[in-house]
Amino acid sequence: MPKDSGIGASPKRREDIRFLTGTGNYTDDININGQTYAWFIRSDVAHGTINSIDASAAEAMEGVLKVFTSADFAEAGGIPCGWEVTDRHGQPMQEPKHPILAEGKVRHVGDPIAVVVAETLEQARDAAEAVEIDIDELEAVIDMKAAVAEGATKVHDDLTSNLCYDWGFVEENREAVDEAIKSAAHVTTLELVNNRVVANPMEPRVAVGDYNRAGDEHTLYTTSQNPHVIRLLMGAFVLSIPEHKLRVVAPDVGGGFGAKIYHYAEEAFVTYAAKVLNRPVKWTSSRSEAFISDAHGRDHVTKIELAMDENHKFTAVRTDTYANMGAYLSTFAPSVPTWLHGTLMAGNYITPLIYVNVKAVFTNTVPVDAYRGAGRPEATFQLERVIDKAARELGMDPVELRRKNFIQPDQFPYDTPVAVTYDTGNYDATMDKALEVADYAGFEARRAESEARGKLRGIGVAHYIEACGIAPSNLVGQLGARAGLYESATVRVNATGSISVFTGSHSHGQGHETTFAQVVSEMIGVDASQIDIVHGDTSKVPMGMGTYGSRSIAVGGSAMVRATEKIINKAKKIAAHLMEASEADIELKDGAFSVAGTDKSVAWGDVTLAAYVPHNYPLEDIEPGLEESAFYDPANFTYPSGAYICELEVDPETGVIDMLNFTAADDFGNVINPMIVEGQVHGGLAQGIGQALMEACIYDENGQLLSGSFMDYTMPRADDMPMMNVDHSCQTPCTHNPLGVKGCGEAGAIGSPPAVVNAVIDALHRAGHKVEHIDMPVSPARVWKAMHG
Amino acid sequence: MTKVTMTINGKPRSGEAEGRTLLASFLREELGLTGTHVGCDTSQCGACVVHVDGKAVKSCTMFALEADGAQVDTIEGQADADGTLNSLQQAFQDYHGLQCGFCTPGMVMSAAALLKDNPKPSEAEIRHYLEGNICRCTGYHNIVRAILAASGQDVPAVAAE
């Protein structure tokens, strides 16, 4: 059994105490003396020309300090995009300017036009009503295929069309794939929609800007998953503030799920306005505002073709996808439908030829960017749905068709035809485990019992793989990332032996303060209570690329391990000096150094004290002090995988679905804290089940977001969710990071949507309804219509 | 502005409120009790649940003036004076019933109200009662388990302890 606080144990989370007692420090809890309040005036039309903005009446109102428009940001840069995709003809993507406040045109409902700053929020809101804005509404472009049709209205006048890029991958395989599909024994085709969703972390976004004129110092408190990335993007590209004059703090952050990765206009606004007004400026998003200003997720329309030979071996996959970018390019948007999606189209299977075509399209909608899983759920959904359909066409068990094509354990490392090399995996093992936990064999008896009650019971299986631990910097640089994605850590050992770890990863629910301390505790042998994890403040942590892409433990944790190794190496030198022994003979165990083969030993605290306040110290050989930093760049992505099984009942009278059971058997490699890992899977599953059954962003033809609040956008509630069976006992450790970990944050959201839809289709087929597909969200109305026409 | 006085977590507190000031804003902005959170603007999410005269209330649906003279209990008053978590809070920690912590104050206050009315709720009753509290992190799984545990009932062994 693991110790109470080391790797593999499930100590309770230390961060829980403040969250359970109302003493957390979220950004909206921060109030600074002299603080003013910003209210954003946003476009209520999807597309239009701004003729005039008259703020004179508003500026004369009580408490109003200033009304800002784009004219105030003439010197500022646009909000930058962090990834450049090259299209199938070798040309760079079309990249429009993304201004802080709209310049001449508005391009989506929610596009910020002007900002009122006043002494109180109520004064700012009241004054906003008095700002007169004259807009000529233009035709809105909402549907992606219409947006790229000949003669379509352009979202950006200075671009040649609404096509951001036309990407082919692997372009050299295009003709070979066409040929393989033509000559295949069997081809299964499926057209599907990956529905647009909103991340909706429970804490809305907040930004507070503060400025110290004496030192020309800016501070931004913001709800971010990566404060250093915001400092870099905003400081270097938008406001021209050097790092030593710009501190970005992301304190307790109430969930992110991708939506809090990106640099947003509101952050640059409050930072800039605080200097202009020489007062702190606070902006707090309402939920309704979040729906029209947070980056959305998914929104792909795809046709996929799966070709097989006469033995049901996959021979080729061809996909044709339209991906919505929205009105502007959000920070990572271009990478999601391309490098986070096309590279996963091999799934867990041997498929010699793959061609992925993606047309990224501008529309008059909120920008779309990465949402939990980002590209990988879209890839998994296509593959796992088309395989289910193929199995049905071939009269095969869908599990058997998958097994027949699985990459086998002895084939790793496995080079896929889509640029990535899987290091480890055992897909039959995760499939076996899921079938066992879900009692797949007992399904027919349960189905008969449901039938007796007039209910249609179905079971759906999906197997996913993801590439995470983002990312090997050299590789992503070749793929268009404008920054490498390494991570850093500093380990500071204090004189009496306690330890502060400064990590560039950011925790917004993942429990880093607990799990990262477990790792260092295990390595050094001191109790975790002696170890603090510091994150989220650029003035404390030297550098960091933040938390997304299930990268925290795989990349940030690895940096921390490397820094801790340096600490141990130096501490051994000091211990050798104290014990007058050879460094090579020093062993560290349970927080004490000993000399091999002797009974000599010194405690951890004696060595750390000697590092700082020595009387007798070998200055020629070792510097005093005990603090080390490390940067870690992963050699490869990590590849978690797993089998998911959904069991549900459909009410044939109403189309209502009752989720009965969900099983997840994941291979995350080594696991640091099983309790936290299981919690991450539960949350991912809930988001995937939510996407599959109820969540949807609905725009009307004029570009109005009809599902723009929690009244209209269906969030999964407690009584929508089943108890979940989560297993992570199948472990093929990652071969290229020091902890053998793969990352667990996104898995649930990646693997669950196809399992749910497969289960619904299964239930309908078993009842004689020859329904091949229902688009997500699989609502009761859609199910009923599929059954009854 | 009107002076409003209420007994909050057993202690008299006063502050100024406009007619339109919501109880949630009054607690957060006027009294600095930032444990009560605001996660939406349509009274859906439940992050702002407090108890007013013993009943669970979404504090964004009530004006501060309406609570004048009331007994109000918030997340800040749930632990013992020395900071020891109460049994419900402790169960949330023990069963990993929270992740980002933003919905947690409302979840704990709702669950406390449930257990007061129904000391041994079934899993289905818990799920139904939490209909007005949204969590985006946990999938509710461990919240339900925490509440079962806090009520002294068996907890389904569907996740590792």
Image (cartoon, rainbow, N blue to C red):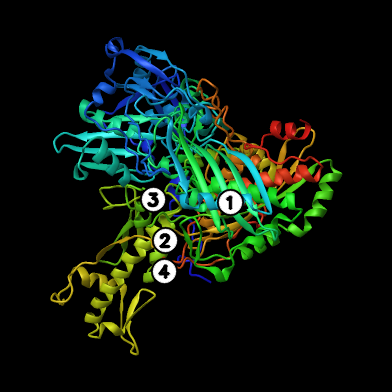
Q: Residue at x 66, y 51 (%)?
A: A387
The residue indicated by pointer 2 is: A636
User: How far apart, in angstroms, are the residues tagged by discs 3 and 2?
Assistant: 14 Å
Choose mark 2 or mark 4, whichever is in front: 2
Choose mark 4 or mark 3, whichever is in front: 3
Q: Taking A646 as reference, is A310 above or below it?
A: below
The residue indicated by pointer 3 is: A479
User: How far apart, in angstroms, are the residues tagged by discs 2 and 4?
Assistant: 25 Å
- Three-letter code, disc 3: Leu
Q: What chain does mark 4 sit on?
A: A
Give whichever of discs 1 and 2 has the lower sequence position.
1
Q: Of all residues shown, which one is farthest toward the right? A: A452
Q: Taking A355 as reference, is B72 above or below it?
A: above
Choose mark 3 or mark 2, whichever is in front: 3
User: How far apart, in angstroms, are the residues tagged by discs 1 and 2?
Assistant: 32 Å
> Residue A301 has which mark?
none
What is the quadrant of residue A526 in the picture?
A: bottom left
The residue indicated by pointer 1 is: A179
Give whichever of discs 3 and 2 has the lower sequence position.
3
Give left or right: position of A153 versus A352.
Answer: left
Disc 2 is placed on an element classified as: loop
Choose mark 4 or mark 1, whichever is in front: 1
Q: Nearer the viewer, residue B19 or A644?
A: A644
- Three-letter code, disc 4: Glu
Q: Nearer the viewer, residue B129 or A50?
A: A50
Q: What chain does mark 3 sit on?
A: A
Observer able to see residue A345: no
